[in-house]
Image (cartoon, grey):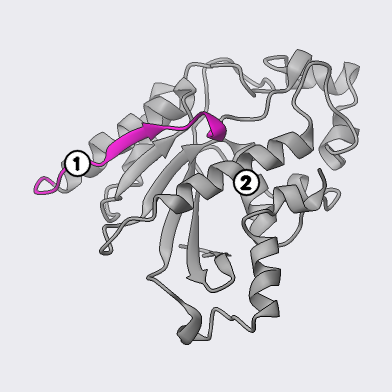
Amino acid sequence: MHRQDADAVVAVEKDNAKAHGDSLDDKSHVQMSPLDIIFWRHGQCEDGAVLRGRSDAQPSEGALIAIAGKARDMAVPARIISSPLQRCARLAQALQAEITAAHPGSNPPDILFEPLLTEMDFGVWDGQSIALLWQTAPMEAWWQDPWAITPEGGEPMHAFEARVAEALQGLLAQAPLNDAGPLWVVTHGGVIRCLMAAILGAGRAAGFYGALELDYGARVHTRWYRTNGGWQGRLLWGS
């Protein structure tokens, strides 16, 4: 698998749209209302500065409260979809409670758990001190070009990208009807960076992931348009 695996839902469909003359600015080709998907990165965890992939770390209670508070003035989502790891699952529950309290007349959004949204498996590096790994493992080289290096027992980058692309296809298939609200997706830094790279057409760009600063609790707003060429995504900066 190569770049097309990572961009299966985004770049390939953009190419198809171009071939058919489709454009986001050409309203005649848009077949339905756009779908907003808001991605939430989990907060800080109790296990400190470690490389946290499949490790199921306990989230910080203070971080859960602070991040969930950001939802208070937002519209009620159609549903919340979360990685099953507890640092995401508990944030999804906190967001559900916050948005329900802020909109007492509305039904609480359902929470669904999607294993495809789990963070990359870092193999023998998973759960290890980042400071120690920078001293003993080729961390800098991996961070600059993760397609060239796979930690022992870990998930290859191309497989991770293909998994995230499959997860995105599943999210887009859940497009709510009748403007029922956006989807909220609670997931991990690696998953969100992978999706941002795909939207921006930056698959396999060395150093790109390291250039995307994505703090704990970050919120990334995307908007998806269904055209004759398939779904096309945009990042909504500053939203």
Residue type, mark 2 in image: Ala
Q: Earlier in the sequence, mark 2 or mark 1?
A: 1
In x, y percent, where is residue 218? 51, 45
Q: Secondary structure at mark 1?
A: helix
Quarter of the image with the C terminus is bottom left
The foreground one among 16 and 104 is 16
The N terminus is located in which quarter?
Answer: top right
Callout 1: 10 Å neighbours few (<14), some, many (20+)? some
Category of crowding for the residue at label 2, using alpha-carbon neighbours closer than 10 angstroms: few (below 14), some (14–19), many (at least 20): many
What residue is shown with label 2?
A: 165
Residue 166 seen in the current view: yes
Image point 75% across, 22% down: which residue?
130
Disc sitting over residue 65 in the figure: none
Q: Residue at x 46, y 84 (%)?
A: 27
The secondary element bearing badge 2 is classed as helix
Magenta segment boundaries in residue numbering? 104-117
Percent x, y of residue 201: 73, 62
Q: What amino acid type should be assigned to the residue bearing mark 1?
A: Thr
Q: Nearer the viewer, residue 213 or 76?
A: 76
Q: Residue at x 50, y 59 (%)?
A: 222
Q: In this orientation, which residue lies closer to the viewer: 208 or 234?
A: 234
Depth check, mark 2 against mark 1: the one in front is 2
- Residue 100 disc label: 1
